[in-house]
Image (tube, rainbow, N blue to C red):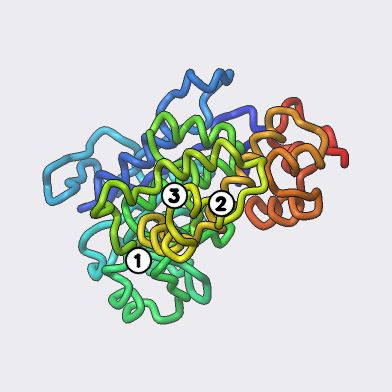
Amino acid sequence: MPQGSSHRPHKVAVIVDEGTNPFEVGVATELFGLPRPELGLPGPLYEVMLCTPVPEVRINHGFFTVTGVHGLAAVDRADTLVVPGRPDNVVPRGPAVLDAIRRTHARGARVMSFCTGTFALAEAGLLDGRRATTHWMWADTFRELHPKVRLEPDVLFVDEGDVLTAAGSAAALDLGLYVVRRDHGAEIANMVSRRLVFAAHRDGGQRQFVERPVPDVPDESLGPVLAWAQERLGEPLTVADLAARAAVSPATLHRRFRAQLGTTPLAWLTGERVALACRLIERGEERLDVVAERSGLGTAANLRARLRRVTGLSPSAYRRRFGPGGGEALVS
């Protein structure tokens, strides 16, 4: 449900059920519910509604109580529905919650789950025959309960168009920023990520569990080489160049990327270049060959292929949707 040119905020409903994880509710409200005056926009990007099946809901083992919010009828006004996870995934959701999920999807709204919220989407029948992910610790249980779902337990999130699923609580931030980027473009997503002090773009195909999230030796941190590369994306950088900068072999660099980022050096470099190309288009660069050169993607043909793979849009369509003023075609 793209909202890049909408004149009204995109309405996001978040179902808060008994036992819901408050972190994931916080992710939804932080990403979609806070005013962002730093963006300089005439109005908010999103409007968030918390929705509960009963007037008072206890979450996180009773540490928090949610009252005074919308009932489930509010989901009928939502453009996007977010379903956070609960720790008791083998306990069926109430019929009112499942009905709210089903009717939201049936009328064509976007439905997203965070972490084990995927169980609720599967229970509602939205995921049969479709790809989805959930927290890796619950993968075997999920397969037993929902064998018709094509579970991908090793990725951060899965985008099936009208239904999106995130692996864990932190992966909810990745999916949320991905949605902001798809709705409003890379420039706004980057500004939101800076406000969050969170990585602007981790590809959904990255692994959700890495062997060493914190390096044993400080000198093995990838931070310096990543910052160095981001300042030189327009140059003909290669994996060998990154390895040389880090003073390691390409094989060692590859292992560190896999361990610390869950991806490969080449995939990371390509993703950063596509993100830069998006920002250049959004800032008004109309010459396709210039965008390709400055982003390090080389040729207009490669830019077209990479941009379509990541965003689903051609460069001209991306500019019409997210560029200044819109409506202008990119020229080669």
74 displayed left or right of 16: right
**Which comes before the other along the chain, label 2 or label 1?**
1
> Residue 55's quadrant in the figure?
top left
Name the residue nearer the viewer: 265 or 169: 265
Instruction: Identify the residue shown where x is 50% and y is 33%.
Output: 46
Reply above or below: 62 against 328. below
Q: Position of residue 98 (x, y in %)?
A: 38, 61
Query: Amino acid type of disc 2?
Result: Asp
Label 1: few (<14), some (14–19) or many (≥20) C-alpha neighbours in 10 Å: many
For the C terminus, the quadrant is: top right
Front tag of 2 and 1: 2
Q: Secondary structure at mark 2?
A: helix
Q: Which residue is mark 3?
A: 246
- Residue 62 drawn at (x, y percent): 12, 47
**What whole-number distance in Å separates the C-alpha atoms at marks 1 and 3?**
42 Å
Front-most of residues 289 and 180 = 289
Query: In the image, which is nearer the foreground, mark 1 or mark 3?
Result: 3
Report if the CB atoms under discs 3 and 2 are less than 8 Å apart.
no
Residue at numbered disc 1: 119
Q: Amino acid at mark 1?
A: Phe
Q: How crowded is the residue under tag 2: few (<14 C-alpha within 10 Å), some, or many (20+)?
A: some
- Above or below: residue 202 compared with residue 124: above
- Residue at image location 23% in from the left, 36% down from the top: 67
Q: Position of residue 289 (x, y in %)?
A: 81, 41
- For disc 2, the marked residue is 241
